[in-house]
Amino acid sequence: MKKFLLLFTTILSSLYLVAQDSISVGFYVGASAVAFKETPAYMPRIGSVSVFVANNFKRFRFDTGLRLTEDYYTLDKKESTGENYKATINATFMNLFGDAAFNLVSKKSHHSDLQLGVSLIKCFNAKEKQQHATQTISYNLHSNNVNLVVSCGYRVSFPLSRNWIINVTPNVNYKIFNVTESANISGHGVYVPPYHVYGNFRFYYGIDIGLEYFFRK
């Protein structure tokens, strides 16, 4: 966590030093669905909150920021004995992201950008709670701690005033690295059964909505 914050602070400092047009800061709240075999592809199971700073150069802009992401979903499962139970899975992630955008439309009422980005994502914890008829079982899940994500979004911005705008950004995201589903996850050659592993998903899509403030020169 400290390394993430140190890197984030360094990037912010460099952006302030090289700004040519304007600096802006803002935040997003978002929701995403996952293309994953165990849950419907349309299921919005991921929520996120992010903060960012943007360096604006005429028709180009570069964003960097931090995003806190929570994955939460419930599955209906069945034991080998035939007993049905519910399994609730949740995991927390931190993303350090950077985006580059190019302005495509610029009107008085709105403007829009094509946004391409990359982020370093780290899983801090993943847990499963099983609700059986007679008992509740909870345990930690093994996960691939760090991954790299590439993203593409189309941001539409609506000015509220000279300094404030609202951003709406549909986006798609893809994790570069696959996640091992069983053996050697611990890194010590210890076999981990698949049902103790946080479920792998590589593709997810969603929408971010947020507010941005511009420091005009």
Image: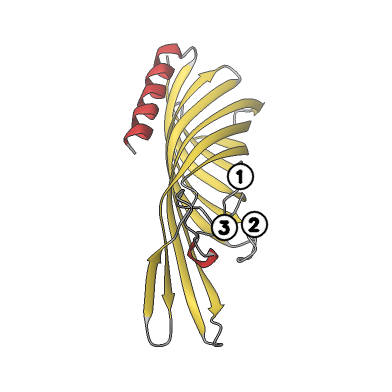
Q: Going by the picture, which residue comes out furthest to the front?
A: 189
Q: Answer whether residue 110 is visible to the viewer in this image.
A: no
Dot 1 lies on which element? strand
Q: Is residue 55 above or below residue 195?
A: above
Q: Residues within 10 Å of mark 3 (few under 14, many from 20)?
A: some
Amino acid type, callout 2: Ala
Q: Nearer the viewer, mark 1 or mark 2?
A: 2
How far across and how far down the image is residue 124, in percent? 39, 49
20 or 77, nearer to the observer: 77
Callout in the foreground (2, 3): 3
The image quadrant that residue 43 belongs to is bottom right
Residue name at image x 51 percent, y 55 percent: 46
| Horizontal side, residue 83 vs residue 35: left or right | left
Secondary structure beneath disc 2? loop
Residue 120 in the image: above or below residue 185:
above
Residue located beneath label 2 in the image: 35
Label ID, residue 181: 3
Residue marked by disc 1: 170
Q: Is residue 166 left or right of residue 2?
A: right
Image height of 184 relative to 136, above or below: above
Residues 204 and 196: in front is: 196
Mark 3 or mark 1, which is nearer the start of the sequence? 1
Identified at 59% across, 54% down, the residue is 201
Q: Quadrant of residue 102?
A: top right
Q: Which quarter shows the C terminus?
A: top left
Left or right: where 210 falls relative to 100 = left
Q: Nearer the viewer, residue 129 or 104?
A: 129
Q: As shown in the figure, which amino acid type bears the numbered disc 3?
A: Glu
Do residues under tags 1 and 2 come within 8 Å of each other at their CB atoms?
A: no
Residue 9's spot in the image, x, y percent? 35, 26
